[in-house]
Image (cartoon, rainbow, N blue to C red):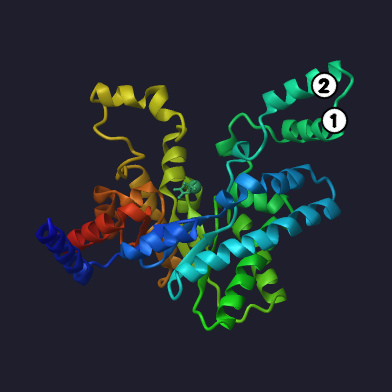
């Protein structure tokens, strides 16, 4: 037992000596960050901040959804800001001295909205009794207004940030203020801000301008890199334009696979892909292992065009593929700087990155 563990440790440490890929983790909590650090993570490559808006915070999120004027919206955001600040304090402290890529909110909106059907029933039943609540009626109207047939192809990521005033700004203030507090305590926080689901350079310019404006307003005293996800085919194709406005790229191969193949990451397996696998039409799902011919070609396009515009552009990947051995081999060949994966995949990612460098 002990000897085996020791030899695995030796193997991984040998891999660390030769690998060129950095290995970061996907983590949204201080616990996950600390666990990943123990496994050897060299930073956070993806913090999904939308996960911080669930649970007890639903009420504030509901108020934000209901807000139809600036005053109500600002009030809802003011409730959320100290909570976000607390989240970032813990996360940055757990990763002290290492980069922490914080992605601005990218919610699949349907996961945040109350169920339209349930709410409609509730309102109808109450109405029959002549006891409908004003709040529920308003909420139902808002939920109906926001309802989409394909929420994963809708108001997500940067699109949401651009149409809900103050949302991104609230998060950026929380990041800057958490970092300032930690620096005041003699710590070394290294946040990076990442903008999700960009498909057009115009979107990135608008979001980046807002982030920079807020950082200037709060007098952020250190450089906070601002980058973007490349997770839509269009973003990969125009990566040269996007690179002009980005300090780094992180390839989101989950969405890139979904949008390149045109099938839903949530439904595809149940809908038909498991039968494709049974019939031997494909040996492996493109969500599990990078599809080199399609998604991989777009990643290479993104790398080439991005670096042609900005040779020192930092490049990572934070989709599930970042923890898959075969995909790691591909990312090494494609010239990425780092992979980011779930905490428990970190040792495998270190090992596979080393193996890739030896091949
Ligand atoms: C991705 O799309 O690959 C990604 C990392 O973002 P998310 O999974 O949160 O959509
Ligand atoms: Mg994504």
Asked whether disc 2 touches disc 1, contact meaning CB atoms under 8 Å apart, the reply is: yes
**Residue lying furthest front in this view?**
2
Pinpoint residue 259: horizontal percent, then vertical percent: 47, 39
Tell me which label, 2 or 1, sits earlier in the chain. Answer: 2
Decide if residue 331 is on the left or right side of residue 5.
right
**Residue lying furthest left in this view?**
3
Q: Residue at x 24, y 48 (%)?
A: 326
Find disc 1 in the rendering and name its residue: 133
Dot 2 crowding, Cα within 10 Å, few <14, some 14–19, many 20+: some
The answer to whether residue 111 is visible is: yes
The answer to whether residue 246 is visible is: no
Pinpoint residue 346: horizontal percent, then vertical percent: 31, 57
Relative to residue 282, is residue 61 depicted above or below? Answer: below
The label on residue 259 is none
Relative to residue 296, is residue 225 depicted above or below? Answer: below
Q: Quadrant of the C terminus?
A: bottom left
**Residue lying furthest right in this view?**
130
Badge count: 2
- Displayed quadrant of residue 286: top left
Secondary structure under tag 1 reads loop
Q: Residue at x 79, y 18 (%)?
A: 125
Task: Give the alpha-carbon distance from disc 2 to disc 1, as whole Å.
Answer: 8 Å
Decide if residue 89 is on the left or right side of residue 59.
left
The label on residue 126 is 2
Q: Residue at x 43, y 61 (%)?
A: 33
């Amino acid at each position: 037992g002990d000897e085996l563990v020791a030899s695995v440790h030796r193997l991984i440490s040998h891999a660390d000596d030769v690998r060129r890929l950095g290995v970061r983790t996907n983590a949204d909590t201080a616990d996950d960050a600390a666990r990943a650090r123990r496994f050897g993570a060299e930073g956070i490559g993806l913090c999904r901040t939308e996960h911080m808006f669930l649970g007890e915070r639903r009420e504030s999120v509901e108020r934000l959804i209901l807000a139809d004027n600036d005053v109500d919206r600002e009030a809802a955001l003011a409730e959320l800001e100290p909570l976000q600040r607390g989240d970032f304090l813990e996360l940055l402290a757990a990763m002290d001295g290492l980069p922490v890529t914080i992605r601005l909110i990218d919610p699949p909106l349907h996961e945040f909205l109350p169920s339209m059907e349930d709410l409609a029933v509730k309102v109808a039943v109450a109405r029959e009794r002549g006891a409908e609540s004003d709040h529920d009626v308003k909420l139902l109207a808002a939920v109906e207004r926001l309802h989409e047939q394909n929420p994963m192809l809708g108001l997500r990521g940067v699109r949401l940030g651009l149409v809900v005033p103050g949302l991104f700004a609230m998060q950026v203030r929380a990041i800057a203020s958490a970092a300032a507090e930690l620096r005041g305590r003699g710590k070394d926080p290294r946040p990076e801000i990442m903008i999700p689901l960009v498909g057009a350079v115009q979107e990135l310019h608008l979001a980046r301008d807002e982030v920079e404006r807020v950082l200037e307003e709060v007098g952020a005293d250190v450089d906070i890199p601002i980058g973007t996800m490349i997770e839509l085919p269009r973003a990969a194709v125009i990566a040269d334009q996007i690179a002009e406005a980005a300090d780094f790229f992180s390839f989101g191969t989950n969405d890139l696979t979904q949008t390149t193949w045109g099938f839903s990451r949530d439904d595809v397996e149940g809908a038909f892909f498991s039968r494709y696998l049974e019939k031997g039409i494909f040996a492996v799902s493109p969500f599990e292992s990078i599809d080199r011919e399609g998604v991989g070609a777009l990643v290479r396009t993104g790398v080439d065009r991005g670096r042609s515009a900005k040779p020192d552009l930092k490049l990572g990947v934070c989709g599930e593929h970042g923890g898959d051995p075969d995909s790691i081999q591909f990312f090494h060949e494609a010239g990425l700087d780092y992979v980011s994966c779930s905490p428990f995949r970190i040792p495998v990612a270190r090992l596979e990155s080393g193996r890739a460098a030896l091949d």
